Structure formats: C-alpha cells, structure tokens
Amino acid sequence: MTANSTPPAVRLAGITKRFGDVVANDSVDFTVEAGSIHALIGENGSGKTTLMSILYGLYDQNEGTIHVDGEERSFDTPRDAMNAGVGMIHQHFQLVMPMTVLQNVVLGHEPVKNGFVDEERAREEIEAISTRYGFDVVEHLDTPVRELDLGTRQRVEIVKSLYRGAEILILDEPTAVLTPQEVDGLIDLMEDLRADGRSLIFISHKLDEALAVADDITVLRDGNAVGTVSASETSEAELARMMVGRNVLFESDARETTVGEPVLEAENLRVAGDRGLEKVSDVSLSVREGEILGIAGVQGNGQTELVEALTGLRTLSSGVVRFDGDDISAASRRDRIEAGIAYVPEDRHVEGLVMEYDLVENGLLGNQTIAPFANGGFLDWGAVREHTEEIIEEFDVQPPNPDSEAESLSGGNQQKFIVGRELGHDPDVLVASHPTRGVDIGAIEFIHERLTELRDEGLAIVVVSSKLEEIQALSDRIAVMYEGEFIDTVDPGDVTEAELGLLMAGQRLDDGGDASEDGVPEGEVSPSGTSGDESSSGVET
C-alpha cells in the first residue's frame, strides 16, 4: 500500500445512479489506493458495471463526486476519463476486427508528422510498452485483430490503454476467456503494472482470483457497498456470504450416477464455420442417459460450430448425428426440439432471448408449434403465461413478474429463465453452452444444482464451458477441444486444473500422466462402450 501522504488514485463518494425507478448505485463510497490492485465483486445487477461506467465517463451520476489523484473531476465522455489517466478493458473487447493491431492501438490517438500518421513513431511507442511489460503483440502489429486468439486480443486492449496514458486501469471480467496459463500470465502482468505505480480495479466473479491478486476487495450487493476487506484477511466463503447475504455451497456432494444407453451420438463430424473454413475436424462423441459430458476449451476452437451441428443450427460437411439410434443429420432445429433436444445458447442476448419482449413472449420461444401452447394454428397465450409463471417460480427468476421485459433482468436471472424454458420442453438431451457465463455466484450455484439433479434423474447433458472449475464440478467425462478436434478425453478426478489448461492450450499429457490419448486407460472399457485400445478416426467420448 502507498504512504498515507499520497492521495488515493480513485475516490468515489456517495455515488447514486438511477435508471427511472431503478436505483443501480445507492450512495456508494469506493476508494482505490494509489499503486494497488482493488477487486470489485458482486452478483449480476449489484451495480459494479454501472459504478465503473460512471468512473469511465459512460454514465453521469445523479449524486456524488469523483476524485482522481486527489482532484475532483467530472467526466462527460470516456475521452475525458482517458485524458485524466483512466482506462477501461471491457469484458467484450472494443476492437475493430478487420483493422490491424497497430491501427486499433492508435485509433483516435494517431501520432502525426507533416500532416500524415507517423507510423514509425507509433511502432516505436507500442514496442516500448510491449518490451516493458513482456507483451507478445509486436509480431502481430500488422495482423488483423480478427485473426488473433482471445488472449492476444486482450493484451492488445491493455496495450491500447497504456498507449493512451492510462495510470488507472479498470479490468472488467478479464479472465473470462483465458486458459489457466493465460490467467497466470495476466496476474503476473497486473502485478508488474502495480509495481510500476499503476492502480488497477479488477472486476471478477472468480473469488479465488480476486483473493490471489488484490490488495483490497469491495463487495457490492443490490447497488450498495456492503464493505471493503483486505484480501489477506478474508476467504472465499466470507466474500460469497457478503455477495449474496447467506452462506453459499461451493461443492456439491458426490453422487452415484447410473449411466444408461446412448441418447445423442455423433460420428466423424466435419463442420465449416461462417467463413467456409473447417472448424470441426472428424469429431465423434456419445452422451448417455444420466451423465454429463463436459466439453472444455478456449473459445474459438470449434465448440460453437460443434454445438450448432448437434442442435440443428448448422449443416454438416460430413458425418452423422444420431438421436436414440436414429439418423437426424438432416433434421431441422424445429424437428430436434420436438424430438427432445433442448439447447441453452452461449449468447443469451443474441440467441436466447428477444430483449425487448416480455417474459411471456420469451417463454413462447421454441414452443410455437407444441401443445398446449399451439392448437389448430392458434396460440394459447393463457397457457404460455401459465408456463412462464411456472418457470419464474421454479427457477426463482427475479423480479417475479411475467410482464417484465427481458432486458430489465440481470444476467443471472436471464440465464435462469432460459434454462427453465428449455427444460420446460421435458427433453431427453440438454446441450448447454457456457451455462453460467457472466452469471453471479448465487445463480451459478442454482444452475449447477439443477443440472446435477436432472443428470441424476436420467437426463443426458452436454455442457460446453471454458471455465475449468465448472467443467470439473459438473462433468462425468471431459473432452478437451483444440483447433477443431478432441485432443483428449479424461476423467475429471484424474486430472488437475493445470493439466486441463495444458490440454486447452494444445499440449497433450505425457504418456505417464493421468489421462491416455483417448481418455481411456488401455484395456478398459469407456462409458461409450469402446475399449481403450480401440482405434477410431476421432476421439470417442
């Protein structure tokens, strides 16, 4: 921590922000000491993003004051905040995909010489920043951002803020798309930035990471600052209690799962992406009654295309998808819904909900042709409303108002509603893609409990996630996807999180490790009924 004579890097005093009748921040006090890392945690809807958006000039506060380096400031735009040395790394990167790394970094702040952009000077300044903090972006300066992996894109965002003179950095959920090794690298970088005198605000749902990197931690709940604690004097359990107002169960009891017959199978799938390039290469899998198959991997390695092929949203280049033994490779998404394949999409705002619709209208999605909601070509809105009210009650959706617009709900409540709607189809298979992405700890606990309960009741479930703690907690088997293939399939109890991270980065485990190349010890029978020494053109899971 800095000496007492040094003013705080940031002091927000009595910040209140209202959106109509909703109070997003209620007289919040928040102080970040100079040269420190301060974690800001809380459930979705607790006011974290709103508070930081005020500091970054995206919103005006209704009440309260902002002080930066001891001076009261007022920011009308993000440019005002950047001019005061405040930068923000958003959870969804603010990069122009077709432009190069260099163009993105200097955009709006181009150095000029004789009336032209001084590219040589820009390169020198970017290289100096990269060398100072060990970034590996210099080799990509002329590469379009869309061709970079997510970890490199994040480093480009950080370089962009440092290039623009940021002394105070807000990092919003920065580890959400990173492998464990990349997370370790980011934490090292944050510590280097702190050692260099910069001040960081770290927004995260991951309590272990907040405890590992932060000096102090502030918890928000329902728009109020519950308290600020020293990271060295608290615990995950205490932080979780502060966040949700009750004790939180972090680990569920081990359950004996009776595995039945294969329900959803895929054989030698090849699937092209939006640009026509092959994104899934010769992948085979099988998920059975009463089990959860976890698919792990850094986003962008073919998981999205695989899920869309399984659920009927993307055409196969080759291969076969079977449901209860029947070939459904050519079946539409509608056909697969009616057959019993439910789907929780990875982007709830784009694919899961119509944000301006109320919950009754969103409750109809996917049910338009299914009794009792459709009868003789007409919709029974009374039945739809009753169904929506059942979802709200069973899945504890807040506020419990079926006439609420989807966009008015927090991310966690939106996700709970989608999960409830999909399970309302009474499916035989659930494919859940990133089911708790951007969801607070209370909603994560709830969704995990429901998935394991349904697994134990005999539902076949596929969970796709880049969160290793989620994959390990839920899965009976884990298939790791890298560059369009299953690089390995492992038992969650036989590998560490670090080993899973290596697999996600494309490194196979050693022959003497806990997992074999196809995830089945030699000579034993896998849950899919194949022996470990049986060869196949794809990894059979």
Image (spheres, rainbow, N blue to C red):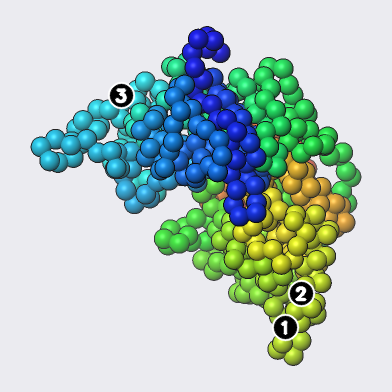
Give, as a three-letter code, the residue at label 2.
Val
Q: Are marks 1 and 2 in contact (CB under 8 Å)?
A: yes
Q: Nearer the viewer, residue 115 or 435?
A: 115
The residue under label 3 is 128
3D distance between C-alphas at marks 1 and 2: 8 Å
Estimate how packed mark 3 is, as few (under 14), some (14 to 19) or many (20 or more) residues with alpha carbons within 10 Å.
Answer: some
Q: Earlier in the sequence, mark 3 or mark 1?
A: 3
- Give SS at disc 3: helix
- Give SS at disc 2: helix
Q: Residue at x 54, y 52 (%)?
A: 302
**Which dot marks residue 384?**
2
Question: Based on the displayed image, in which of its 4 quarters is residue 13 positioned?
Answer: top right
Q: Earlier in the sequence, mark 1 or mark 2?
A: 1
Question: Based on the displayed image, in which of its 4 quarters is residue 394 positioned?
Answer: bottom right
Estimate how packed mark 1 is, as few (under 14), some (14 to 19) or many (20 or more) residues with alpha carbons within 10 Å.
Answer: some
Q: Residue at x 80, y 54 (%)?
A: 396
Q: Residue at x 18, y 40 (%)?
A: 117
The residue under label 1 is 379
Residue 329 picture location, percent across and down: 62, 71
3D distance between C-alphas at marks 3 and 1: 63 Å
